[in-house]
Image (cartoon, rainbow, N blue to C red):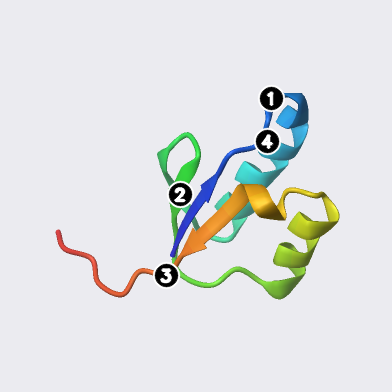
């Protein structure tokens, strides 16, 4: 799965929290706001994004095949 996000500078603390959380879920940074990881995010995490009003700033993409 790929996660892409664009969190405004005024919400820098939330952006920092988001990066820490996705690291915990096993995601690795490709670029500052583009991460790749092993699978779906927990529903409780997705709800937290909505509670923080950043759900619209975070996009996820399911990968079906990776070419090396």
* Residue in front for this viewpoint, 39 or 10: 10
Residue 41 coordinates in the image, percent (x, y)? 60, 68
Q: Earlier in the sequence, mark 3 or mark 4?
A: 4
Direction from residue 53 to residue 63 in the image, left or right: left
Q: Which mark sits nearer the N-terminus, 3 or 1?
A: 1
In terms of image quadrants, where is residue 29?
A: top left
Q: Is residue 8 above or below residue 27?
A: above
Which residue carries the number 4 mark?
16
Q: Please give the residue where the numbered disc 3 appears in the rendered image.
A: 62
Between the C-alphas of marks 2 and 3, the distance is: 12 Å
Residue for badge 2: 35
Q: Quadrant of the N terminus?
A: bottom left
Residue drawn at x 48%, y 71% is: 39
Look at the image and tell me in which quarter the C terminus lies.
bottom left
**4 and 1 marks in contact (CB < 8 Å):** no
**Rendered image: mark on residue 9:** 1
């Amino acid at each position: 799965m790929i996660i892409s996000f664009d969190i405004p500078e005024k919400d820098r603390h939330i952006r920092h929290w988001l990066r820490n959380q996705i690291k915990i879920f096993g995601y690795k940074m490709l670029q500052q706001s583009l991460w790749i990881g092993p699978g779906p995010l927990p529903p409780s995490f997705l709800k937290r994004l909505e509670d923080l009003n950043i759900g619209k700033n975070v996009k996820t993409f399911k990968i079906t095949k990776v070419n090396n």
